[in-house]
Image (spheres, grey):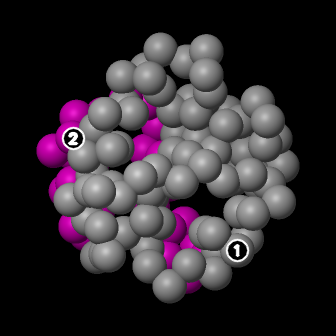
Amino acid sequence: MAAIAEVSDDTFEQEVDKSTLPVLVDFSAEWCGPCKLLVPVLEEIAAEYEGKLRVIRVDVDNNRNSAARFGVLSVPTLLLMRDGEVKDQIVGNVPKRQLIDRINKLL
């Protein structure tokens, strides 16, 4: 089962921008209730899309440069990225079906 990778400011470029797979980036925070509710959904997606999509998490409190780079003002913020470019953005906790629909458009 694929795990959600924790990415920092220092590893963002290597893990996301240079990824050969599309990436779902979860900008979240430990104190964020909706972020915690989203974790099981993201874990399911990571497992279901293993080999097709990477799912990574960025803690905005500890990685302010990455959050600032993408103008993240609210958590959770999800970015769907390919080849280092943002292809879609979702702010807030959304149903799994909506995430799947948007991921499938990216793939």
Look at the image and say whether residue 100 sits in the magenta stretch. Answer: yes
Q: Residue at x 39, y 33 (%)?
A: 39
Is residue 25 visible to the viewer in this orientation of the structure?
Answer: no
Residue 37 x/y as whole percent: 36, 23
Residue 49 x/y as whole percent: 26, 65
Marks 1/2: CA–CA distance: 27 Å
Q: Which residue does the numbered mark 2 point to in the structure image?
A: 96
Answer above or below: position of 85 versus 41. below
Q: Which residue does the numbered mark 1 point to in the structure image?
A: 14
Residue 7 x/y as whole percent: 66, 53
Residue type at mark 2: give it: Lys
Q: Which residues are magenta?
A: 78-106
Q: Residue at x 43, y 65 (%)?
A: 54
Answer above or below: position of 79 versus 35. below
Structural crowding at the residue carrying mark 1, measured as other residues with C-alpha within 10 Å and reported as few (<14), some (14–19) or many (≥20): few
Using the image, tell me which numbered label, if any, was put on residue 79: none
> Residue 60's quadrant in the figure?
top right
Tell me how many marks there are: 2
Left or right: 4 as drawn, with respect to 9 = left
* Secondary-structure class at tag 2: helix
Structural crowding at the residue carrying mark 2, measured as other residues with C-alpha within 10 Å and reported as few (<14), some (14–19) or many (≥20): some
Q: Residue at x 15, y 44 (%)?
A: 97
